Amino acid sequence: MAAAETASGYIQHHLTNLTYGQHPVNGWSFAHNAKEAQEMGFWAFHVDTLAVSVVLGLFFILLFRAAAKRATSGQPGKLQNFVEVLVEFVDGSVKDTFHGRNALIAPLGLTIFVWVFLMNFMDLIPVDWLPMLAAKISGDPHLYFRVVPTTDPNATLGLALSVFALILYYSIKVKGIGGFIGELTLHPFGSKNVFVQALLIPVNFLLEFVTLIAKPISLALRLFGNLYAGELIFILIAIMFGGGLLLGALGIALQWAWAVFHILIIVLQAFIFMMLTIVYLSMAHEDNH
């Protein structure tokens, strides 16, 4: 039972975010446990998710800025080759998928792919390394610190809602308010009879509205679910290292095997998020009515 409680506490600790918010009793402070974090309510901040996301975003910007400054028409370096491959890959994906004309889409696709990949990549770092480093720096051995932003639904929903805002913006810009409302109310069922069409409007709106809302929800939950499952498996494997020599050796083998397989997952999920964003924005630019 003690071993089970220890394992349960270990898992719970690694799945709890470093939360800062206004507690009913303690005021503005960091949560010391999951209960306090819950009591802080909706407007609490997951500091670890925000910090890691911002650091990775800055790393992406500085890396590509360095590549752009060193770019040459002669013999390119390794960094330039790497960046050019990524840019050509994303540019080809946009040309094949996006059928409108918008200079924002390719840079947006590149940003989404690289940034989401970097956030996913944090899942390959051994689960105890960065939390222990953060605990030593802070002086709090019980500090909560999750290092994979995409295992936090707040981060994936934030990304998805940003894409959703662009979908709404370009839908209205390209089709106009009337065209956008007509798309939600006059399809998929239509009739030449005005009275029948009026009766079909609530049905059409229900179907199209659900389809519209499902876009950001599916974007967010797909990314979150896959990375959360991967993180949980890494945590369960890490528990094996405390179970003796035999379990520890098995844990090492399982960790390497799962890490190799997980490389495919983190790349695939970044690619899917990028491609769905491009597809949704392409649909928003279609003016068929």
Image (cartoon, helix red, strand yellow):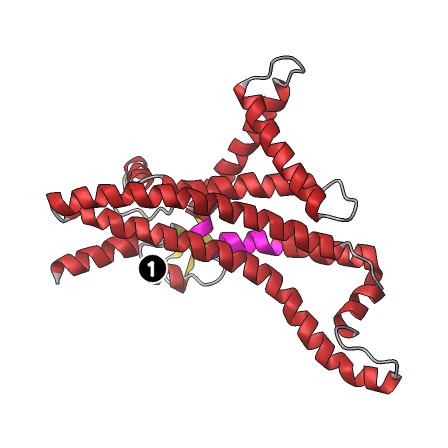
| Residue in the foreground of this view, choosing between 14 and 34 | 14
Quarter of the rendering containing residue 160: bottom right
Magenta span: predominant SS is helix
Kind of residue at disc 1: Ala
Magenta stretch contains residue 156: yes
| Residue in the foreground of this view, choosing between 51 and 82 | 82
Kindly identify the residue that appears in the image at 14 percent across and 57 percent down.
Answer: 3
| Residue in the foreground of this view, choosing between 86 and 102 | 86
Q: Quadrant of the N terminus?
A: bottom left
Q: Quadrant of the C terminus?
A: bottom right
Give x and y (percent) for residue 107.
67, 38
Residue tagged by mark 1? 34
Viewer can see residue 94:
yes
In this view, 27 is above or below 214: above
Label 1 SS: helix
- Looking at the image, residue 153 sits to the left or right of residue 35; the answer is right
Kindly identify the residue that appears in the image at 61 percent across and 53 percent down.
Answer: 276
Q: Which residues are magenta?
A: 150-161
Quarter of the rendering containing residue 212: bottom right
Give x and y (percent) for residue 56.
49, 37
- How packed is label 1: few (under 14 Cα within 10 Å), some, or many (20 or more)? some
